[in-house]
Every structure is written in C-alpha cells, then in structure tokens.
Image: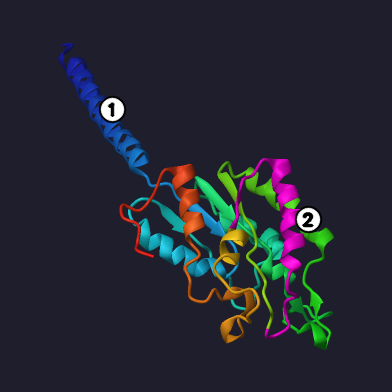
C-alpha cells in the first residue's frame, strides 16, 4: 500500500538528479567559457586609432578582443563628445583594459556659433574647439566615469601637430594639452602610453602632412607598436612572431 508513494519518491529523486546534472553541466560550461574567454580591450580615440586597431587585431588574433567604436558621420571625437557618448561606448560588457585619448578633436579649429560641427581655418575666423580650462575639467570627469567601469585604464598622449597645410590646427598646441592631461592622469594614478614621443620620432615635424590630413597622417608608418607593448605589459598578450620592420 506504500508502493505508489515510494515510486513517486524515486521519480522525484530521479528528476532532481537530472536537474542537478543539467545545472552542473551548464555551470561547468560557463566556468570553462569564462576560463577560455579572451581579454577584452576597448580603444577610445579619434580616427588615428582606426588603422592602429586594425593592425593589432591582425597581429593578436585569437589572443585578445580589441574593440574600437566608430563615430557616426558628422561626430568629431573630443573630450566633450566623449562624455556624451561614454555610456554607449562602454556598453554592458566587461572590459579588462581601456585605452583612451582625447586631444586632436579638441585642438581643431571650428566655425563659431554653429551647432553642427564645421571645421574652419584659423585665418577665416575659426576658434579652437575646447579651451584648456574646459579640456582639463572634461578629463577629470571622464577619468572618474571610466574608473567606475573597473578596467585597467591607460591614457594615450596626443600625437604631434606639425605644420598644418589647411590651417585648422596650430602647430605645437598639443604640448600644453598633453601637460594638462599628464597632471590629471598623475592625480588618478593612470599610466600614460607616450604616443606623442613615439610618433614624433617617426615623422618630419617641419614638413606638412600629406593629403592635407595634417596630424592624422603619419607618412605611412605604423604607429601601433606602443599600444602593442601596453597589451603585452598589462595583459600578457603578444604576437608569436613580430612582423619585420
């Protein structure tokens, strides 16, 4: 007379065993996936980082995930737009390292009193996009928000501005802005990837950049080695064989 009860107990126990095995399988799979997950790197910066990221993705394929969110047409990356777009750029994912820079987009001269961003040469009445005071203030805010993401942060110094064939940049203005950024990063204990010194050693500072691209053109020389070294130093990832220079 107790047999139906015993049978139902065995059925329940079997069901619980199946459920336990299922959850163990799922959890085991999740743990294995977590162990095998590649480090995730977010690169925040202007268009010079597009080619840089492309080179690193090829050299470090299968070793690290490198993400570079592109700007929508008409949007210029600078310390102002970085603050507006930051939540979208960070997304909901986990980041192991965030390499960030704002500078060239702050130093470019634009049409005054126009809501849409329009570049305007200095001799035609263009004004610098971001004042030194606002730049420093923006960086303090940006760093505070980035630190909340929990990733290792690395600042990339702004690359050199040489003679501007279009007169929308002023040669040497990046030096003062790099000094302001260095002060902010030192206060927050954030290391700097010295892109400025590396690029300055590659190009002729007295020659106008080709194609009217000013500081966005590097005489077809690769500028990604400093960031590759950052990834090796902080994440332990590096190409098996370095490409020949």
Side of 122 where 18 appears, left or right: left
Side of 14 where 76 appears, left or right: right
Check disc 1 and report the residue beneath it: 20
Query: What residue sits 82% from the left and 65% below the top?
Result: 131
Front-most of residues 39 and 20: 39
Side of 32 where 129 appears, left or right: right
Q: Residues within 10 Å of mark 2 (few under 14, many from 20)?
A: many
Can see residue 70? Answer: no
The picture places residue 21, in percent across and down from the top left corner, at 25, 30
Check disc 2 and report the residue beneath it: 136
**Where is residue 189, by image quadrant?**
top right
Magenta stretch in the rendered image: 165-194
Q: Is residue 123 above or below residue 107?
A: below
Q: Which of label 1 and label 2 is nearer to you? A: 2
Front-most of residues 226 and 87: 226
Side of 5 where 169 appears, left or right: right
């Amino acid at each position: 007379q107790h047999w139906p009860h015993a049978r139902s107990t065995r059925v329940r126990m079997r069901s619980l065993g199946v459920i336990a095995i299922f959850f163990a399988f799922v959890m085991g799979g999740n743990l294995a996936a977590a162990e095998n997950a590649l480090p995730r790197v977010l690169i925040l910066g202007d268009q010079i980082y597009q080619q840089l990221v492309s080179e690193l993705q090829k050299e470090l394929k299968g070793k690290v995930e490198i993400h570079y969110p592109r700007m929508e047409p008409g949007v210029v990356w600078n310390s102002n737009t970085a603050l507006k777009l930051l939540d979208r750029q960070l997304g909901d994912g986990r980041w192991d390292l965030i390499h960030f820079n704002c500078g060239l987009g702050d130093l470019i001269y634009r049409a005054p009193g126009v809501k849409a961003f329009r570049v305007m040469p200095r001799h035609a009445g263009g004004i610098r996009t971001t004042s030194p005071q606002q730049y420093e203030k923006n960086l303090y805010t940006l760093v505070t928000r980035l630190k909340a993401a929990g990733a290792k942060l690395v600042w990339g110094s702004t690359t050199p501005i040489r003679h501007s064939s279009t007169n929308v940049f002023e040669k040497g203005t990046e030096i003062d802005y790099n000094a302001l950024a260095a002060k902010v990063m030192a206060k927050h204990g954030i290391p700097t990837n010295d892109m400025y010194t590396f690029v300055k050693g590659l190009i002729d500072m007295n020659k106008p950049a080709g194609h009217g691209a000013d500081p966005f053109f590097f005489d077809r020389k690769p500028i990604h080695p400093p960031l590759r070294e950052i990834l090796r130093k902080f994440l332990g990832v590096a190409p098996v064989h370095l490409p020949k220079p």
